[in-house]
Image (cartoon, grey):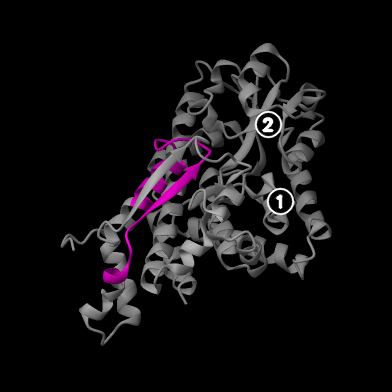
Amino acid sequence: MTTQMTWARAAAAAAFAVGTLGTSALAQDAWLEDLEPMTLKLADFSGDQNANFGKAMVAWEESITEFTDGKITFENYWSSSLLGALDTLEGVGDGVADIGLIIPSYMPQKLPVASWMFGMGAALSGSTVHDVAAGGATALETLLTYEPITQEYASHNVVVMQATATPAYNLLCNKPISSMAEAEGKRARAIGAVWSTTAEALGMTPVSISWGEAYEGLQRGVFDCMVINPNQYADGLTLKDVAPEYVPVTMAQLQASTWVMNKDIWDEFPKELQDFITQANVKAAYDIWQGYMEIEAKAGDLIAAGEVIHTNDISELEPVAAAQRAEFIAALPGTAPAAVEDPEAFVANYQDRIAYWTKALEDQGYAVAARTPEAIMEAFAGLSDVDLKPFYDKFNAEVTPGLMD
């Protein structure tokens, strides 16, 4: 075994110390001697190894390979090269891949509870740090601990490893929109009720346009706005070329982008390895949180420069969107699947956890940014200095141990 104490070995040693006091080092490593070498296939439809998810998952893989002394290695299939967004749930369950990325709202018939929970993405502040970290922490602990969701995934022969949440979605438009009158009748690509209902409240018409046609559609005026993260100005389609009007009205975040593993594979792992992977899962979520800070900071630099992108004043739009999102959350209990026994309590508890993690960030010096043009620019400028390590440490200390019981 390697003698270098990387974070992987250090974390593992700490975990083992809790449950193996008085056990010899030889006994502690017996599981590793018995572990059969294997290569696990990871399928990610969302991007490649240089994208935010890709970077985090490659680091996750490397930690597991090191922890197992090279007995577990990985093959990566990026950008839908093995499984697409709609194929991954069944593909991982059937063993076509061993690990994959799931967006539950894409398959509400197969994942009704997780898809319903997606609506909690409307319960956010619009402040990037808090929506990514506090919203992400709430999504993560819920998907890992809420039994109707864990059972729902298990019914497809997969186990949830970790889940994250994006920053709030905004509008990227090909024409200025700074009033209800200017928003009226504009066509906005909004895939999902959690976004389309807000667009409708603003007087816009939601349209369904495939992702691959979005750039050309904006360029040709087939539709007027994208409901999407501002990081698309820096990454992905680089929409600044065809949608230079940034309308930072707060729309729901994409909640619970979920990484899963084939349950048969997981169940065969010894407890020591499961515990380590559980810790590595939380570390991967933290890496994604921190990655969003870096991506949004790049977009913020482009927005703040004001050379290509124009930021619209949303003082008239934001109260309308906020009221609609509150109505959406209030109506969620009435649309809950039967497996959610007390949907009112679920929604209230979820909001309490968002508030709890938001306060943790505030206690660490991160105030919730107001939704004025000046405050938005100031918040963007500060994203490159955000360090979520203390927040991760708090989550890791309070939540992770319970996941390994």
Examine the rendering and report whether any part of residue 355 can be seen: no
| Residue type pointed to by label 1 | Gly
Residue 295 drawn at (x, y percent): 45, 36
Q: For mark 2, does the 10 Å Cα neighbourhood hold few (<14), some (14 to 19), or many (20 or more) residues?
A: many
Going 44% across and 31% down the picture, which residue do you hit?
298
* Residue under pointer 2: 314
Give neighbour class at mark 1: few <14, some 14-19, many 20+ (Cα, 10 Å).
many
Q: Where residue 102 sits: x, y (%)? A: 58, 48
> In this picture, which residue range is highlighted in magenta?
32-61
Residue 254 vs residue 266, the one in the foreground? 266
Q: Is mark 2 on a helix, strand or loop?
A: loop
Marks 2 and 1, how far apart at CA: 23 Å
Q: Residue at x 54, y 52 (%)?
A: 92
Left or right side of 338 for 177 = left
Name the N-terminal-most of marks 2 and 1. Answer: 1
| Residue reaching furthest to the bottom | 22
Relative placement, left or right, of 321 versus 284 is right
In contact (CB < 8 Å): disc 2 and disc 1: no
**Quadrant assignment, res 186:** top right
